[in-house]
Image (spheres, helix red, strand yellow):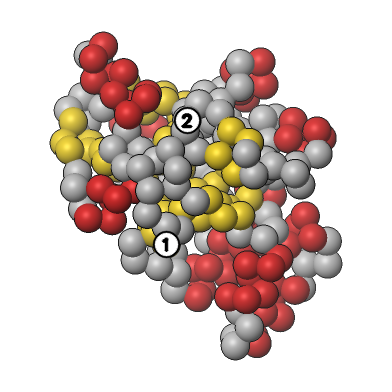
């Protein structure tokens, strides 16, 4: 059984310090490496209660400049801050359902693609599952394969687009079965979780993708 290692590290010790970051305005720009530098970038972590009552995702970004803050909120597609990717979910949709405002933490996937972790949406998201996506997390807590990741799933940005029409794929049973078809040991590991919800959770999938060499 693969041990779940720390895949994401939140560097909250630096939140009160000005930091240099960069962003792309589209997925095409990300693939092409067209980054724009931005100074005094600060990630703001949304609390569980904020997400429950207001909605939205884990993060927003501020710079202290109103014009640039507007760009961060509405125009940036992906931000890189302290070697970590954050995907702006504001304009992204899955099965005609919005993810909501704000950023989710992401990872480069298989070179030039992006994977991000967030709550499940779309047809498969029952009300109970959707609400559970809001009811966890604390400022400064790392996602380390705990219950935080068990309530979340992985999505893949897997084709060119402008951030508004980008195709989003849920990494689910069908995706993983196809991916691991010729890798019997990892396929066995994936199937070791008997419940579909547990199999498709980020807590179970991320270590397998890491073992496969698709994420770092």
- Identify whether 24 is placed above or below 194: above
Q: Residue shown at 40%/67% (left/top)? A: 110
Between 82 and 131, which is closer to the camera in this rendering? Answer: 131
Residue at the image position 57 percent from the left and 34 percent from the top: 99
Local packing at callout 1 (Cα closer than 10 Å; few below 14, some 14-19, many 20+) is some
Q: Residues within 10 Å of mark 2 (few under 14, many from 20)?
A: many
Label placed on residue 109? 1
Q: Position of residue 164 (x, y in %)?
A: 43, 38
Judge left or right: residue 191 versus residue 42.
right
Residue 90: mark = 2
Residue for point 77% across, 55% down: 197
Q: Nearer the viewer, residue 22 or 42?
A: 22
Q: Picture coordinates of residue 103 (x, y %)? A: 45, 34
The reply to whether residue 146 is visible in this rendering is no
Q: Where residue 146 sits: x, y (%)? A: 65, 49
How many marks overall?
2
1 or 2: mark nearer the eye: 2
Q: Secondary structure at mark 2?
A: loop
The residue at the far top in this view is 66
Whole-percent x and y of residue 188?
Answer: 71, 80
Q: Is residue 155 left or right of residue 19?
A: right
Of callouts 1 and 2, the N-terminal one: 2
| Quadrant of the frame with the N terminus | bottom right
Evaluate if marks 1 and 2 touch, with contact meaning CB atoms under 8 Å apart: no
Rendered view: 107 above or below 39: below
Q: Residue at x 35, y 43 (%)?
A: 162
User: Which residue is nearer to you in this view: 4 or 203?
Assistant: 203
């Amino acid at each position: 059984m693969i041990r779940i290692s720390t895949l994401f590290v939140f560097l909250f010790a630096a939140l009160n310090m000005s930091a240099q970051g960069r962003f792309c305005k589209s997925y095409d720009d990300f693939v092409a490496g067209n980054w724009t530098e931005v100074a005094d970038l600060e990630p703001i972590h949304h609390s569980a209660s904020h997400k429950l009552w207001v909605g939205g995702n884990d993060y927003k970004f501020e710079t202290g400049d109103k014009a640039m803050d507007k760009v961060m909120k509405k125009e940036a597609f992906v931000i890189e801050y302290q070697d970590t990717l954050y995907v702006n979910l504001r304009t992204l949709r899955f099965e005609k359902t919005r993810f909501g405002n704000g950023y989710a933490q992401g990872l480069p996937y298989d070179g030039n693609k992006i994977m991000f972790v967030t709550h499940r949406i779309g047809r498969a998201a029952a009300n109970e599952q959707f609400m559970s996506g809001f009811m966890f997390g604390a400022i400064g807590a790392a996602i380390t394969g705990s219950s935080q990741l068990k309530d979340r799933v992985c999505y893949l940005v897997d084709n060119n687009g402008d951030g508004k029409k980008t195709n989003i794929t849920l990494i689910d049973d069908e995706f993983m079965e196809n991916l691991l078809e010729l890798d019997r040991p990892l396929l066995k590991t994936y199937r070791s979780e008997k419940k579909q919800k547990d199999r498709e959770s980020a807590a179970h999938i991320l270590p397998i993708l890491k073992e496969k060499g698709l994420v770092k």
